[in-house]
Image (cartoon, rainbow, N blue to C red):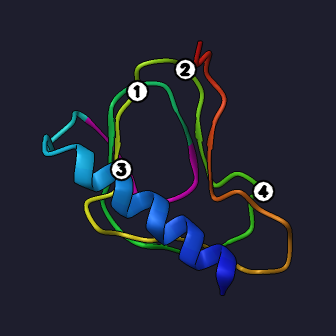
Amino acid sequence: MKRMFSIFVFAILIASFISISGYSATVSDCAVITEDTTLTADIVDATDMFCINIGTDNVVFDCQGFTVDSDDSTIAAGIRVSGDMF
């Protein structure tokens, strides 16, 4: 529950800073993202350790209020940013 709340808060923070939507790429399941992308549905009970993996710099991931949720059977990050950040 605490992990789901953390993921939810992270998604809300992203959404509050980004008002642009309608990116050409969309996802509705776990994925590696390398371009601006919009989430089109809740992801519930994901089994991947990193369900959404942002794999490059300068990428916007717009959750549009949808949730990324794990199945609670593993230690998962939900959304991972692995591009260069500095």
Q: Is residue 29 magenta?
A: yes
* Observer able to see residue 20: yes
- Comparing 58 with 13, the one in front is 13
Q: Residue at x 74, y 68 (%)?
A: 47
Say the numbered circle drawn on residue 77.
Answer: none
Residue tagged by mark 2?
56
Residue type for callout 4: Met
Q: Residue at x 35, y 50 (%)?
A: 14
Residue 65 position within the rendered picture, expressed as x and y whole percent measured from the top left? 29, 68
Residue tagged by mark 4?
49
Q: Which stretch did the figure color magenta?
A: 25-31
Mark nearest the camera among 3 and 1 is 3
Give the Cα separation between the discs numbered 1 and 4. Answer: 20 Å
Query: How dense is the environment of label 2, judged by Cα within 10 Å: few (below 14), some, or many (20 and up)?
Result: some
Residue type for callout 2: Thr
Residue 42 position within the rendered picture, expressed as x and y whole percent measured from the top left? 41, 72
Q: Residue at x 42, y 59 (%)?
A: 11
Disc 3 and disc 1 in contact, CB within 8 angstroms = no
Q: Earlier in the sequence, mark 3 or mark 4?
A: 3
> In which quadrant is the N terminus drawn?
bottom right
> In which quadrant is the C terminus drawn?
top right
Residue type for callout 1: Val
Secondary structure under tag 4 reads loop
Residue tagged by mark 1?
59
Residue 70, picture quadrant:
bottom right
